[in-house]
Amino acid sequence: MNKKFIVYIPAGYPDIQFTKKILEMLNQLPVTGIEIGVPFSDPIADGEVIQIAHQTALKNNINLDIIFNLLKKIKLNSQLFIMSYLNPIINYPFGVKKFLKNLYDCNIKSLIIPDLPNKEIKNLNLNFPIIPFAAPNTNEEEIKIINLLKPEFVYYIARYGITGERKDLPFKDKIKYLKTKINAPICIGFGISTKEQVIEVFKIADGVIVGSTIVKELHTKNLKRIEKKILNLIP
Amino acid sequence: MEFKGYFGEFGGQYVPEILIPALDELERAYNKFKKDKNFWLEYKNLLKDYAGRPTPLYFAKRLSSEYNLKIYLKREDLLHTGAHKINNTIGQVLLALKMGKKRIIAETGAGQHGVATATAAALFGLECVIYMGSEDIKRQSPNVDRMKILGANVIPVYSGSKTLKDAINEALRDWITNLKNTHYVLGSVVGPHPYPTIVRDFQKIIGEETEKQIISKENRLPDYIIACVGGGSNSAGIFYNFINKNVKLIGVEAGGLGLKTDKNAASLLKGKIGYLHGSKTFVLQNKWGQINQTHSISAGLDYPGVGPEHSFWKKIKRVKYIAVNDNEALNAFLKLSKLEGIIPALESAHALAALDKIKFKKNQIVVINLSGRGDKDLNTVLNSLKNE
């Protein structure tokens, strides 16, 4: 199977020791990518499940350095991405240079920045690969910007809405259309929470990103249960 | 380097990709109707006959003699719903109608913008949803009742600090979900482009009227214009017309319990450049880029960011920003009430308190933007006096 199966894990939820255990467990599963979520006080693209994870992690004083230190210690089999809102990145207290060095040291493939739309990527001039977004309302002009970036993959937002569990996969024609226009692989996230959806996505696109449906289970700290949850999503 | 939607380096559109087409749609609609004489006529007629413009520029005689100045108050408090906010909500709801939107959403802190939005939505018969932090609902309950009577659905926001910033987060989440039929009426000169420009343009009438009025009364421009700055819409509204004129402009931020404490809302004086609610601007934040919880006695100023154009005016030193503490604002609130028979909003009381902070020359002309009336604040004021 050549499809990407990417799991979103909010760092430090319910605590950083458990994040380490989850990452070690993911190493044993057929997961192709891990998106590590950096907690933020104002996650505007996220639904309740991930909001709670961010708030809890912040109460635990989780910050980028704690996350970098963890990632430097673990050797991961799958591709690693950092998902963070823009402000904690730009205001990293030890400067952009040190931030980038940490990304390289942790073997991060790309950054995923939910409040950075494609057209602001060039204004930001960060000098590190950034995953662009596509959505049901993406137009020709946006597609051009996306293709110029030559990204590792394109994060397609499946619906008008925020993160959180759903059962459907709307706008399939849009996905098929984007597949003919976008050169990079297209992975689909936002509301992917059943195996049926994953099967649907694999037919028309290149991968999925699953978040809330797994994040919802993390507070149990029950590794077996979480492992089963993930395996149940993989066709 | 100048990009579209920026004021110098500040502003931009730092929001999820899915909002970009909606912001583009709004920008196109605004640019189209900006040039449309009929649109502006309709807007100005509503401001005149419905909202009560022009507002008076009142010479505050007893206050003036107290300070040896000529102090004029721009009486935005006399507008329908009791604050300048209605200038913007009528404009934006009119724009929403032209765009064919059926549903209006807004955030509110003190409840003034919520009331002004619910009012404009009622006027045009549109569905209206207002997001308000659960903390603010507690401290501004009269305005919650007003919104409900006007037919709005007031949704409490329990996330984060449960105040204005979290109400904006929740309104943005709603907008992302309901783009097609919904217009988000942002209440201040904050947020992603084109909001800071649209809101400023709907508020700049304050400064335009002020110029005409002061010329007819004094035959010259004022020496100073003073206004409070939370997100910054009343101040941008009165400043904008004077940016290229020889007038000293003073923006007053909420100093809360003091700038040396972390209990304030002085984003321009104490913040770092960052990204919040779609724009690059000065933001109160901690070492790790997490947004701080702010404090001000005035719910309308209790916000960790500020409009990007203010950040620009600070950087080019066109506007001088200062801070006024809770107790100073409280004293100014009481002083104006007793000296002039005008109960100001606690927000506007910050601008009034600046009179004690600036070294004026005798008989200089000072215009203060009295952005709102203080009825909503009586509980807060009485409680604070009890605790003293």
Image (cartoon, rainbow, N blue to C red):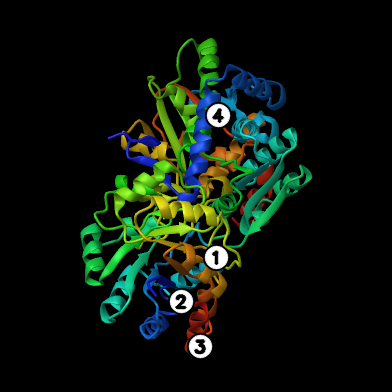
How far, Cα to Cα, is label 4 from label 1? 38 Å
Circle 3 residue: A222
How far, Cα to Cα, is label 2 from label 1? 20 Å
Where in the figure is residue A102, as x and y percent of width and height?
24, 68
Q: Residue furthest right?
A: B149
How far, Cα to Cα, is label 4 from label 2? 44 Å
Q: Are marks 4 and 2 on the same chain?
A: no
Q: Are marks 4 and 1 on the same chain?
A: no
Q: Are marks 1 and 3 on the same chain?
A: yes
Where in the figure is residue A212, as x and y percent of width and height?
52, 70
Q: Chain of mark 4?
A: B
Is residue B269 something one can see in this rendering?
A: no
Disc number for residue A179: none
| Camera-side mark, 1 or 3 | 1
Q: Quadrant of residue A110?
A: bottom left
**Looking at this view, is A26 or B182 the one in front?**
A26
The answer to the question of whether label 2 and label 3 lie on touching residues, with beta carbons closer than 8 A, is no
Q: Amino acid at mark 3?
A: Asn
Q: Are marks 2 and 3 on the same chain?
A: yes
Residue under the image location 46 percent in, 28 percent down: B239
Residue B369, above or below A87 = above
